[in-house]
Amino acid sequence: FADLQPTPELLELARTQALRDLVDEQLQLEEAAKFEINVTGDTIDRRMVDMATRSETTLDNLTAALATNGVAVSTLRNQIRAEIAWQRLIGGMYGSRVRISENDITETQERIAANARRPQYEMSEIFLPADTPEEFNQMEQGAMRLLEQMQQRAPFPMVARQFSQSPSAAAGGDLGWISANELAPELRPVAERLQPGQVSLPVRTENGVYIIAMRNRREGIPEGAASIVSLRQVTAPAARSNSLDRIRRNASGCGDLENAIRGIQGASVLDLGQTVEAELSTDIRSRLSGVAIGGASAVVTNGDQANIIVLCGRETGGSSIPDRQQIEDRLREAELSMLAERYLRNLRREATIITRQ
């Protein structure tokens, strides 16, 4: 509890969270064992080295820091074992079933573009998960204790790192800039009322209890603001136009275009750079009409050459819209995360858990 007062209430919150984490680890390991998923010591060693590298330290220093805080290396190794085993189980069980449609990607891109024109919040969060009425009550009480600590000048990022159970905890709860539509419905009216520098009271949602902090606010990008597009042109002999059309149909961004043209004799990729969209020629704007980010225009033939234009990205008022591959990756990760949490929640409900004092 660095910089926090170790009150009985905070100790109880920490104990509750630690117990939940231990139960989840054991459930994950037992379920993985049913499918004969084994995580070797070498795999755990590599993950620990990666953790140390990301923290800009060595494995020896990481181990020493754990010991200083009273954490046994075996505890961390078991956490890593459970995490890797669970990832493999979820990937094997659901990975091939998750299908992200082109329509899903297009709708998400359109929603991100629309959200860029709505008011934006720069926010941080603390999330305490709960399933049962008893857990919700415990987490609300724990959240109030955390608020008291912050009122006594404990920094929000430090409290988030120690207690929040959301992925943003590693970044001190930082969510970056988001629009109201990206928040849980219960949080939207709270965010609307918060001013920069203010922290909310605990808010109960479907999955747990939140505390949110408003760091800054800004108006959405005005309608008609200049859009800057990044373009690349893929050219090939007219006789290879069918190959270009295949690239067009499969286009999902500009990162793999060089590989895509391999085997197409005479094909090349030209980086057209960034241009204000309104300044493009009428012909180019017409070709790009209706093309989603990461997509490509129809094939156009001029004499003995044919080409397509790929829309790599678009920025409006400094707000960048992800390309199709990035959107697909995000949607797949979100879907797998939801399935994993549902699976684990069912395991908790079915398990017999005996707690000894």
Image (cartoon, rainbow, N blue to C red):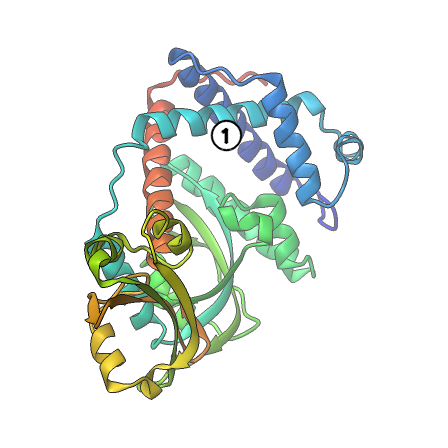
**Residue drawn at (31%, 51%), measured in percent from left and top?**
264
Q: Position of residue 357 (x, y in %)?
A: 59, 18
Residue type marked 1: Arg
The quarter of the picture where residue 280 lies is: bottom left
39 shown above or below 255: above
Inspect this view and state whether residue 322 appears.
no
Q: Position of residue 99 (x, y in %)?
A: 24, 41
**Residue identifier under label 1:** 20
**Residue drawn at (61%, 48%), measured in percent from left and top?**
161
The quarter of the picture where residue 54 lies is: top right
355 shown above or below 212: above
84 shown above or below 14: above
Q: Secondary structure at mark 1?
A: helix
Which one is nearer the viewer's eye here, 280 or 293? 280
Instruction: Please rate how many residues cluster around mark 1, counting C-alpha atoms within 10 Å: few if below 14, some from 14 to 19, many from 20.
Output: some
163 sits to left or right of 288: right
Q: Position of residue 311 (x, y in %)?
A: 33, 67
Inspect this view and state whether residue 155 appears.
yes
128 sits to left or right of 304: right
The residue furthest front is 304
Which one is nearer the viewer's eye here, 152 or 67? 67
Which one is nearer the viewer's eye here, 272 or 228? 272
**Residue drawn at (28%, 32%), measured in percent from left and top?**
96
131 shown above or below 79: below
Which one is nearer the viewer's eye here, 218 or 328? 328
